[in-house]
Amino acid sequence: MAENGIIDLHGHIFLEGSMGAAGWCGPSIGSNPDGSPFFQVGNYRLDGVGYRGSIIGDVEVRLAAMDEQGISVQALSPNPLTYLHFIDAHLAIDFCQVHNDELAAQVRAHPDRFVGLGALPMQDVPAACRELRRCVNELGLLGGYIGTDVGRFLDDPTMDELYSTCVELDVPLFMHPTQSGIDGPLRDPRVRRFDLDLVLEYSFEEVLAVSTLVFGGVTTRFPTLDICISHGGGFTPMGMSKLRKIAERRKAAPAWISEPGAFDQAVSRLWFDCHVAGAREFEFALAQLGTEHLVFGTNFGGWDKGTGPDVTDLRGTLNANAIRLTRMDRRAPHIASRFV
C-alpha cells in the first residue's frame, strides 16, 4: 500500500556543529541585551531567531512537526543564510565539508525520515565538484544545493564542470536564493526596507536563474541535467510570456531560441518546487509550469511556514516526481518503496 504522507524536498536545517566553521563569517548565535536571540552570518544579523530548540534546529521538534503536517520524508538542505559563496574559497571549502558531515549524520540517525542535499563551495568549481562526489559517494547524500548567485553567470563555461559532474553522478542540483549583503555586497538597500528582500530579492533571483539557464543554453547543452528552482521559480510564471517574446523577437537572444517551441522546450527541462503562497498564485503557477516537473516543498521552519498551497489532490504526482528527481528509487529504495 502506498504511503499516505508526502515527500518534502524544501526543508532547511540549522546544524549546531557547523557554527564557527567559516572563519570570520561565523556563523554564530548570540543574545541581544534584551535577551532575545540572534543568528549572525558575516555582515548579516537575523534578530529574534536563535534556531536552538526550534523546528529548524532541533530534530525532535522537527520530526513532531513533520508528523503533524503529514510529511513522511524530508530532504534536509542548507540554511540559505549559510551558502557563503563570496568568502575566500578555502573557508567555503572547510565550511561545506563540516556542514555536509553534520547533515549526513542527521540523515544516518533517521534514515526513514530524512535524505540530504549537500552544500557546495562555488568559489572554486573544481572543489565544488570534489565535494559533490564526496557527498554522493561517501556520505550518501542525493545531490547538491547552491545559491542562485554564485559569483559568476550560471551559464558561464566554468560552471559546465559542475553540470557535467551532476550528469555523471546522475544526481539533481537544487538552486535557492538568499539575501545579498551577507558575505558579499548588498545589491540594493531599498529591498531591505520592511524585509522586502525576503520576497522581492528571492523572487527576482529565481526568475533570473531560470532565464540564465534557459537563454544561456544550459538546459539545452545538458538535456539530462535536472536542476530544481525553489518557490515555483519566483517571478517566472508571471514573466513567461514576456520572456518568450524576448526569445522570439530580440536580437540579443541566441538565434536557436527564436525557433518555434525552443524557449518552452528549454524551460520544460527545469524542475520547480511548489512553495508558492496563495491559492490563486499557485493555480496560475500550475497553468504556466504544469505538474510534470513539480515537487512538494514547504520552506520548513522558514518565516513563511504555513503559507504553501493545498496539494492534497496532487500528492501522488508530487511524491512520484520527488522520487524521480532525486533517484530515490535507486539511492534510497527503503524510502521510495513506501510510496509505490
Image (cartoon, rainbow, N blue to C red):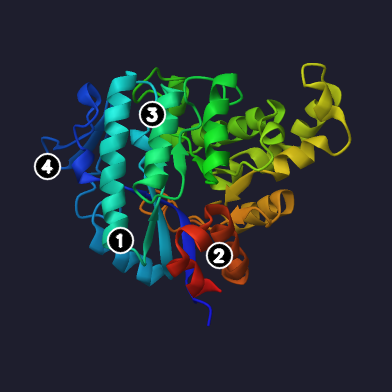
Residue 305 is situated, as x and y percent measured from the top left of the image, at: 41, 54
Residue 14: x percent and y percent?
28, 46
Q: Which element is circle 2 on?
A: helix
Q: Amino acid at mark 1?
A: Arg
Element under disc 4: loop
Q: Nearer the viewer, mark 2 or mark 1?
A: 2
Work out how far the residue at label 3 is from the one at label 1, CA to CA, in angstroms: 27 Å
Q: Residue at x 48, y 74 (%)?
A: 338
Q: Is residue 271 left or right of residue 335?
A: right
Residue picked out by circle 4: 35
Identify the residue position indicated by label 1 in the image: 62
> Which amino acid type corresponds to the residue marked 2 in the rendered image?
Asn
Q: Earlier in the sequence, mark 1 or mark 4?
A: 4
Disc number lying in front (3 or 4): 3
- Label 4 CA crowd tier, 10 Å (few <14, some 14–19, many 20+): few
Residue at (41, 35) in percent of width and height: 195
Identify residue type, mark 4: Gly
Relative to 298, residue 95 above or below? above
The mark found on residue 121 in the picture is 3
Determine if residue 277 is in view. no
Quadrant location of the C terminus in the rendered image: bottom right
In the rendered image, which quarter is residue 255 located in?
top right
Frontmost residue, 239 versus 58: 58
Query: In whole angstroms, how far apart are the C-alphas of marks 4 and 2?
Result: 42 Å
In the picture of the structure, the residue carrying the numbered disc 2 is: 319
Mark 2 nearby-residue class (10 Å; few <14, some 14–19, many ≥20)? many
Between the C-alphas of marks 3 and 4, the distance is 34 Å
For numbered disc 3, what is the local secondary structure?
loop
